Image (tube, rainbow, N blue to C red):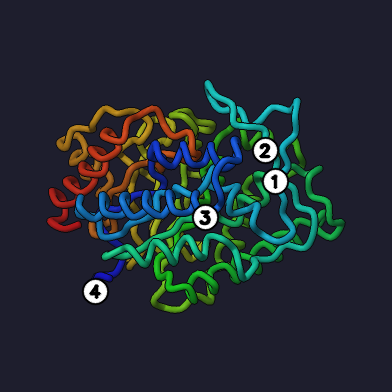
Amino acid sequence: MTTHTPPYRADHVGSLLRPVPVKEARKKFYEDKSISAEELKDVEDAAVTDVVKMQQNLGLKAVTDGELRRSFWHFDFMGALEGLDLEEREGEQGLQFHGATVRPIFPTITGKLDFPDDHPMLDHFKYLASVAKVTPKISIPGPSCCHFRVAKEDVHPKEYQDLEVLFADLARTYAKAVKKFYEAGCRYLQMDDIFFAYLCDPKIRAEKKAEGLDPDWLIDQYAKMMRDAIKDRPEDMLIGMHMCRGNFKSTWVAEGAYDPAADAVFNKTGVDIYFMEYDTDRAGGLEPLRLLPKGKKRVLPGFITTKVPDLEPLDDLRRKFDQAGKYADLDQLGIAPQCGFASTEEGNLITEDDQKRKLELVVKTAEAIWGEV
């Protein structure tokens, strides 16, 4: 383990393209039923070890397991919670992206929510930590995901019809998760809470209003959930939060500047490090960064995209940071790609070599601007 601690200047959101051996083993286990769970784990362990070495060799000081053991960035975590099931429904359409449709999986709240002591991602983190020579980081979906991604009719317990009761239980469940990850040795936990950005999209805001929900009230409630979930964490545990507008096979869902959510995100969540999509005009301008409070909080603007292989010119990235520096102290900024490379096991439409070059660019940019990673 390194003696250096986060936040770092160079970082990435977490997910990585699934190597061919992992894809083949997952097919053999889940579809063909031709290998055992232990055989699948052996393949995943070897692949995680390899991607950790790759990240370390590039000079990154925080490494992830690439989410290689997951099918989705969020559903795998959610489905292992007590009181939440994942239902596959034939004949129904999955989530629609611009140009692609996700498999029809529907998270359903069936009972009282809780974080189990044997949640599989605790072991995922422990294995990552065992092979990492730098800081191991794990990413999980933020608490808002368990509301935004669950249709109203799929919330079965009567008490959860009262959203404040549901949100309080989600905060309690996540507070337990934070505690358990800390006990497992995690000092850098990231929560992907992308729905703050979704609630900045005029179309999605209108949809929520049609459901009888005030999107601004929802933003504040999501911020409170996050704050309540992490407020009792030990001082040596940092919490990151990623925000984007959708990422599936290089496609997207939402658009709109961060303005409606920026104050809540920066000043009401209690989060330490912010990963913010900024690779296209869909994310709006950099003006919301002015609301970042002075101090130790850090924003990593995602000027580098994971959706296409083209490398951003370093001079262009420098200019973007010159612009960002007008709204936030450059010392409170870093660099990361705008999202993961594979939010689902299908992955974005790039190659592993493209992925490596993008991560190299992250490190190179940090060294050029701050003289450190």
Asked if one can make out residue 199 in the rendered structure from this viewpoint, the answer is no
Q: CA distance from mark 1 to mark 3?
A: 23 Å
Query: Mark 3 sits on what residue?
Result: 38
**Answer yes or no: do the residues labelled 1 and 4 have beta carbons within 8 Å?**
no
Rendered view: 211 above or below 125: above
Asked if one can make out residue 301 in the rendered structure from this viewpoint, the answer is yes
- What kind of element bears circle 4? loop
What's the amino acid at mark 3? Glu
Q: Nearer the viewer, residue 64 or 95?
A: 64
**Mark 1 / mark 2, whichever is N-terminal:** 1
What's the amino acid at mark 2? Ile
Query: Mark 1 sits on what residue?
Result: 86
Q: Nearer the viewer, mark 1 or mark 3?
A: 3
How many neighbours does mark 4 have within 10 angstroms: few (below 14), some (14-19), or many (20 or more)? few
Taking the spot 23% from the left edge, 31% from the top edge, the residue there is 311
Rendered location of residue 110, percent (x, y): 79, 54
| Left or right, residue 192 beside residue 176 | left
Q: Residue 3 has which mark?
A: 4
Q: Furthest-right residue in view?
A: 158
Q: CA distance from mark 1 to mark 2?
A: 6 Å
**Mark 2 / mark 3, whichever is N-terminal:** 3
- What kind of element bears circle 1? strand
Query: Mark 2 sits on what residue?
Result: 105
Rendered location of residue 276, percent (x, y): 40, 46
Q: Quadrant of the N terminus?
A: bottom left
What's the amino acid at mark 4? Thr
Q: Nearer the viewer, mark 4 or mark 3?
A: 3
Quadrant in the rendering for residue 4: bottom left
Q: Nearer the viewer, residue 52 or 191?
A: 52
